[in-house]
């Protein structure tokens, strides 16, 4: 009995050392402590397996966050690289990756697919290489490229169609949510989460 108490006390002391862990791992550790206290070997084995699985998942996610997610890009044949993007969780777009654009920019025809009401949006002008265009400012609920998703993205919507930008531009209002590298030669975009995101 004394040995069992020392094992539980030792476990609880080590449990306190994990204050920085996610809620999921903390819950797994609590379940393991309860299983140990119950003395049920099948519960202990199941709780250990769950904790092990979840620790592995989190380690893999940390590795991805550090290394970044590599997103293959498509060349348009005119020197631009385009990314498959999911907007507001359900509308696919093919956007030109443009590190010179301060915001995500969407073409007039594409915005119709989103069903965004521009009547109350602030209006102004944006400059694209071939000139100045009237645009409306909106905030997209979410923009996702590969596994990397960001929310509340400032976006300019062109009020007049510009065929040269296709669906639009993937600009810095999305890219700056991450550490990003644009590999022109390898035709890929590498996104790493900012620390704290």
Image: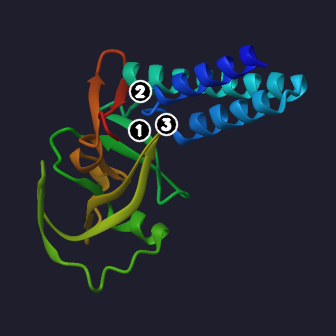
Disc 1 target residue: 83
Q: According to the image, label 3 marks what residue?
A: 146
Residue 95 can be seen, yes or no: yes
Q: Is residue 190 above or below residue 152?
A: above
Instruction: Give the percent coordinates (x, y) of residue 105.
Output: 27, 56
| Closer to the camera in the image, 186 or 22 | 22
- What secondary structure is found at the residue carrying circle 3? loop
- For the residues labelled 2 and 1, the Cα–Cα distance comes to 20 Å
Question: Considering only order in the chain, which callout, 1 or 2, is on the residue closer to the N terminus?
Answer: 2
Instruction: Mark 3: give few (<14), some (14-19) or many (20+) Cα within 10 Å.
Output: some
Front residue of 63/129: it is 63
- Secondary structure beneath dot 2 equals helix
Pick the quarter of the image with the N terminus. Answer: top right
Sequence-earlier tag: 3 or 2: 2
Q: Nearer the viewer, mark 2 or mark 1?
A: 2
For this rendering, which residue is in front, 149 or 25? 25
Instruction: Give the label on residue 65, or none.
Output: 2
Label 3 or label 2, whichever lies nearer to me, is 2
Of callouts 1 and 3, the N-terminal one: 1
Residue furthest out toward the bottom: 119
Image quadrant of residue 12? Answer: top right
Dot in front, 1 or 3? 3
Q: Is residue 61 left or right of residue 162?
A: right
What residue is at 13 percent from the left and 61 percent from the top? 126
Q: Residue at x 88, y 28 (%)?
A: 40
The answer to which quarter of the image holds residue 58 is top right
In the image, is residue 128 above or below residue 9? below
Q: How many marks?
A: 3
In three-dimensional space, the C-alpha distance between marks 3 and 2, rounded to whole angstroms, equals 13 Å
Whether residue 134 sits left or right of residue 148 in the image: it is left
Instruction: Please tell me which residue lies in front, 45 or 116.
Output: 45
Residue 5 horizontal/vertical position (percent) = 70, 22
């Amino acid at each position: 009995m004394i040995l069992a108490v020392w094992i539980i006390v030792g476990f609880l002391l080590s449990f306190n050392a994990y204050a920085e862990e996610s809620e999921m791992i903390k819950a797994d550790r609590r379940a393991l402590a309860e299983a140990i206290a119950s003395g049920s070997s099948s519960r202990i084995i199941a709780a250990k397996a769950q904790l092990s699985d979840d620790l592995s998942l989190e380690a893999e996610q940390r590795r991805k966050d550090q290394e970044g997610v590599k997103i293959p890009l498509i060349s348009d044949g005119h020197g631009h690289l385009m990314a498959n993007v999911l907007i507001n969780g359900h509308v696919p777009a093919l956007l030109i990756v443009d590190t010179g654009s301060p915001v995500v920019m969407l073409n007039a025809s594409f915005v119709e697919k989103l069903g965004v009401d521009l009547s109350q949006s602030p209006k102004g002008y944006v400059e694209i290489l071939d000139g100045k265009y009237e645009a409306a400012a909106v905030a997209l609920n979410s923009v996702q490229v590969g596994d990397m998703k960001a929310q509340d993205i400032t976006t300019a919507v062109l009020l007049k169609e510009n065929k040269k930008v296709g669906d639009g531009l993937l600009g810095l209002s999305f890219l700056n949510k991450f550490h990003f590298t644009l590999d022109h030669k390898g035709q890929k975009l590498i996104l790493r989460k900012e620390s704290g995101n």
